[in-house]
Image (cartoon, rainbow, N blue to C red):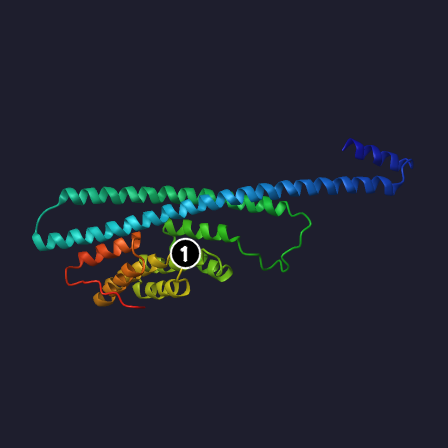
Amino acid sequence: MKRTIFLLVLWLAGLVPAGLAVDKEVIQLQQSVALLQGMVRELQRSFDERIVVLRTLLEQSTDRSNQLSTGITSLQGAVQDSLGNSGQKVDNLGTQLQGLQMSIEDLRARLDKLSQQVTKIETASQTISSMGSLGGPGYGDPAMPPPPPPDVLYNTALRDYTSGNYPLSMQEFTDYLRYYSDTPLASNAQFYIGDIYYQQGLFEKAIQEYDKAIEQYPNGNKTAAAQLKKGFALLNLNLRTQGIQELSNLVKRFPNTPESSLAQDKINSLGPEAEPKATSR
């Protein structure tokens, strides 16, 4: 800075040609900007690697929480059926199930808080990344802002889903599919759209969305989960035969998975007449 002022004074005094002072300062400024941009890119790369790991762990924890909740709901239904048939009292078991359900709700709250923190970090990262792209091209039409980056949009939608803000989460997952339908998390977004309908008791719409997840993303992360929840939705619509068949197909298609275990438990809870006879889809 002092050197710049010195050259400027000399130039004003007519002792240094204007072009010489300006050219040297421009070259130094360009070199400094290039160095800073390189540092920002390296920091961004390192951050992206770590945030991918964190986001994966966060989603796995959310999935486990949802599976536990589904399993408890199924177990509670089986307990109620048992009470209705035998008239026995299992107050202690009911209390234990209630305590476990509360623990899961606490876990979900913690996951929601962590998801919010991850979203804030990713937003800050995108701001830093844009600052590192000085002089880059704009997006064009200022009236049409670009969509959020895929990770930010997905994590925001997942956070709103886990916190029960279903209308906003629905819009965000829909936007994700609109802008990023070819990414690995597209199948997850499609599953959660169906699950939002399921949580609201709109089982017919849920089945339609689960079918999209199953058919459009046969190798997706949520294909087994979509088929499991589709089976549950059919049972909730009193379509017993179709529901059992869907769960049976899941057991055969995705053996040795948490979803197949939950499906088999549900089939067993429906009585001995519910025999799993898997058929091709």
Q: Position of residue 165 (x, y in %)?
A: 38, 52
Which of these two is toward me, 95 or 20?
20
Q: Is residue 46 left or right of residue 245?
A: right
Q: Residue at x 58, y 60 (%)?
A: 144
Q: Is residue 16 above or below residue 160?
A: above
Asked which quadrant contains residue 208, the reply is bottom left
**Furthest residue in direction right, as rendered:** 14
Q: Is residue 144 above or below residue 113?
A: below
Q: Amino acid at mark 1?
A: Asn
Q: Position of residue 179 (x, y in %)?
A: 51, 60
Q: Secondary structure at mark 1?
A: helix
Q: Is residue 173 visible?
A: yes
Asked which quadrant contains residue 102, the reply is top left
- Mark 1 highlights which residue? 188
Q: Residue at x 42, y 42 (%)?
A: 114
**Furthest residue in direction top, as rendered:** 2
Q: Is residue 119 visible?
A: no
Q: Is residue 116 above or below residue 269?
A: above
**Furthest residue in direction left, as rendered:** 87
Q: Position of residue 193 (x, y in %)?
A: 39, 59
Q: Residue at x 39, y 45 (%)?
A: 112
Q: Is residue 83 left or right of residue 213?
A: left
Q: Residue at x 16, y 44 (%)?
A: 93
